[in-house]
Image (tube, rainbow, N blue to C red):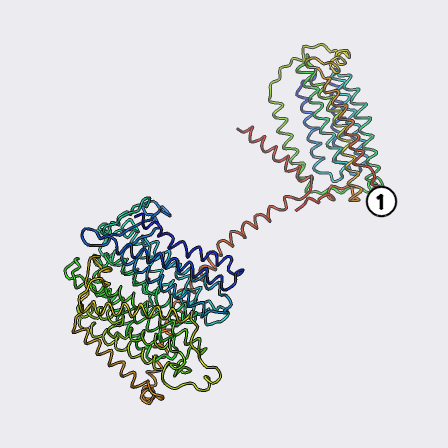
Amino acid sequence: MANSIMFCILAVVILGSAVMCVTTTRIMRAATFMLFVLFGVAGLYFLLDYTYLGAAQISVYAGGVTMIYVFAIQLVSKRTLQGLTERMKGSRILWGGLLALIGCVTVILVLWKNQYVMAGMMTPDVEVPMKDIGQALVGAGKYEYVLAFEFISLFLLACIIGGLMVARKEDNK
Amino acid sequence: MEIYSYSFLILLLPALSFVILALAGMKMSHKTAGLIGTTSLGLVTVLSYVTAFAYFGGNRLADGTFPTLVPYNFTWLPLGNLHFDMGILLDPISVMMLIVISTVSFMVHIYSFGYMHGEKGFQRYYAFLSLFTMSMLGLVLATNIFQMYTFWELVGVSSYLLIGFYYPLKPAIAASKKAFIVTRFADMFFLIGILMFGYYTDSFSFSFAGNIVMGEGATPFIAGNAAKAVAAAGFILPTALVLMFIGGAGKSAMFPLHIWLPDAMEGPTPVSALIHAATMVVAGVFQIARMFPLWVEYAQPQMSIVVWVGVFTAFYAAAVACAQSDIKRVLAFSTISQIAFMMVALGVSLPGHHGVLDNHAQLGFMAGMFHLFTHAMFKACLFLGAGCIIHAVHSNEMALMGGLRKYMPVTHITFLISCLAIAGIPFFSGFSSKDEIITACFEYSPVVGWIMTGIAAMTAFYMFRLYYGVFWGTENKEAHEHHTPHEAPATMTIPLIVLCVITMGVGIYSTIAGFAGWGGSFGQFVNAEGTNYTIHFNLQIAATSTIIAILSICLATYIYKGESQPIADRLYKTFPKLHRAAYKRFYQDEIWQYVTHRIIFRCVSTPIAWFDRHIVDGTFNFMAWGANEAGESLRPWQSGDVRQYAVWFLTGTVALTLILLAI
Amino acid sequence: MVPVQYYFVLSALLFFIGVFGFITRRNLIAMLISVELILNAVDINFAVFNRLLFPSSMEGMFMTLFSIGVSAAESAVAIAIIINVYRNFKSDSVDSIKNMKW
């Protein structure tokens, strides 16, 4: 019962913020709404008893990525910040909306029609133990993720360095 | 057959000489180029004589004919049923032609040392002479009609190149184009004839009956199945042969396709001697001689076409020659007339009984070939002599010549001998051959016989008109004070002497042999059946023609010998229009011009050109325009707009999903 | 318990809202934000599949974890590019980088 109510609240938050995010003309507001969406998704993870995942979502996404976007907005969209808003072309909205609608309907129909074996109904409402997650993350056995873990750390390093290289200021000789 | 294994050298040497002179000629000095050309020709001449001695001195077959030897024959282009071969075929007429071509060509090569001395393009000239010699030799040594056609075209090309040798001059270019176009037009008929022939008889080879001895490694002839052609339709073989004759008529300057030959005199005189007197223009005659068994077997009624075309041409050319003032034009028309004689000779060779050549009927064939031989010699001598005269006087016009006998003795004597030969005086070679032709004509029909006799008289007349106009008559004193005409250098007079010696030698021997019935004369070697044929002169005809010739010479002497020509002037005043018409060759060129420009160009070519430009080109232009428009309309898809790409991406994905779901 | 289909519907709606935003917006950063929405929808999907349909394994969670990491990296690089674009074209609109047009 409580789950359903929680789910509804979270769903409203997420979808409402998402819609506002894509339709608002002011860019700073879009970033803020995105933040709300991210919080909502984190909540959803907590609802699913994925505490670690929820924590990662909040710290990385809601914290790090949103900050990056805010800084980027400051650097790039000066005009927009000063209140100038973006114009939205009517025909494009129509077209895009129609397309999104059709796609959405298709996907939902597919998902709804399928018969899912509800194994999850039988599990107790406990969160995944942290010990298991930790062991799987750095374990080297079968179905364990040390390779992906190492790889992603290097990957992040490469992306950061790449980003720095791309965005550095050229020296005028 | 091994003794003939060198025969490919006869074709190879001039070809090599052509390639060397064409590629490296400009880097050599004139003398080197000339020596290379002449030496290779000299070798070819030696080889030709060796071949002739070996062939004619060799054994005859059981039935008395000479075997047809094919030392080399290879398949050049196989095409399903038919195949184009290239090879060398030795039989009496081709070996005889070898001698003619190589001798005259060699003389011309030596002569050109003197005549073309100092000319720009000397090396190019010798290169083209070699090309021509090779082509002509290939033509006579052909083993099948298609090879003959190939070399036929090569000969036409060489002629074009040589006539247009002085290409900075407009008349030369016009003349070379005219020659090439007219002969090419005639060759169109030739080709159609060949294709008909090949298609219906399943073969291009000259494999009519006869005893063919193949060399080792030579592709055997597939006998042409003439019966099949006859079975298909009776008119096919005669039509094919007549079409081939039209091609030959173009090359041999028969009326009305003769228009190129007088203009071809724009080329250098040795070229006129070689190509347009002795060798290329007899290609048509040679072609009929080669196809002779087929003509006799299947196309006898059509031979009258040959006869009458020949008769008319001979008369026409003789008439025009009487009124020409340019020395080379007179000789050109004389050539046309004499070749017509040869055509008539071949045409009147009807078998006595159907399909069987008896003794009398072979006369025409043999006479035609003999006249070809003698004509080549004395006409070449005449042309080369004319070259010496032109060299001395620096002009072609007879009006500027006169009284040259004092200054140019050798030329004078050789020219006189050749004129006597062409007039048909006994003990000169023209007598025997021309007499035989007239005898054959009388056997065919008295009308033709008397017409040909009349033309022979005209021949004597205009040749001596030329002779007197050049060597006697009024001297051009002013010009001679400026610059005395002198005898030509030795390189130019020696060929004259050699050719004259041949003329006289053949003439004396054949005259005596004809009267005394000796063996070893021409008829023994070359005649239609291939067997021994001894020439006997028909005394009545011989006497008649000799008397008429002498009468014509006397007439010409009377009119033209003196310092002034009162009778000639009076004739000119009485018949001005006739003279003018004859001078302008009876307006034949104007008629052709009218036909081509007004009729063919306007009514046939212009609509076709319109069709080609608008419809054929239009279709392709339209297709190109269509492709262009399609491309232009697709171009905006590459808009550079990322969002649009995303839209299309999404649309595609959704559409695919829907399709997959539907399926 | 919330039936699993509702989660799917939620994730699908979020996904297509993100797509709509990507197509419609002209500002580069707004487009990126829409992409983030899409990625989040996908993450929800993974997590739900894992938790409610295959609770004994953990692949879905780790997939989501790594996806979060990767999207962080990708945002960083994308922002760097956008800054470069701004420097060269002096504009933050996607219409300004149409150089690959015909």
Count the labels in the image: 1
User: Dividing the picture into quarters, in which one does residue A60 lie?
Assistant: top right
Residue B372 position in % (x across, y down): 29, 65
Residue name at image x 20 percent, y 72 percent: B449
Residue B183 position in % (x across, y down): 37, 64
Q: Is residue B19 left or right of residue A114?
A: left
Can residue B595 be spotted in the picture? no
User: Three-letter amino acid code at disc 1?
Assistant: Lys
Residue A170 position in % (x across, y down): 82, 41
Q: In this view, does B643 lie to the left or right of B504?
A: right
Q: Is residue B416 above or below residue A152?
A: below
Residue A111 position in % (x across, y down): 63, 23
> Disc 1 designates what residue?
A173
Residue name at image x 31 percent, y 60 percent: B97
Query: Of residues B89 and A171, which is closer to you in this image?
Result: B89
Query: Of residues B650 and B140, which is closer to you in this image?
Result: B140
User: Dividing the picture into quarters, in which one does residue C7 lie?
Assistant: top right
Callout 1: chain: A
Can residue B239 be spotted in the picture? yes
Q: In this view, does A31 lie to the left or right of A107?
A: right
Q: In what element is the residue under mark 1?
A: loop
User: Dividing the picture into quarters, in which one does residue A39 lie?
Assistant: top right
Query: Of residues B352 and A75, which is closer to you in this image?
Result: B352
Neighbor class of circle 1 (other Cα within 10 Å; few <14, some 14-19, many 20+) is few
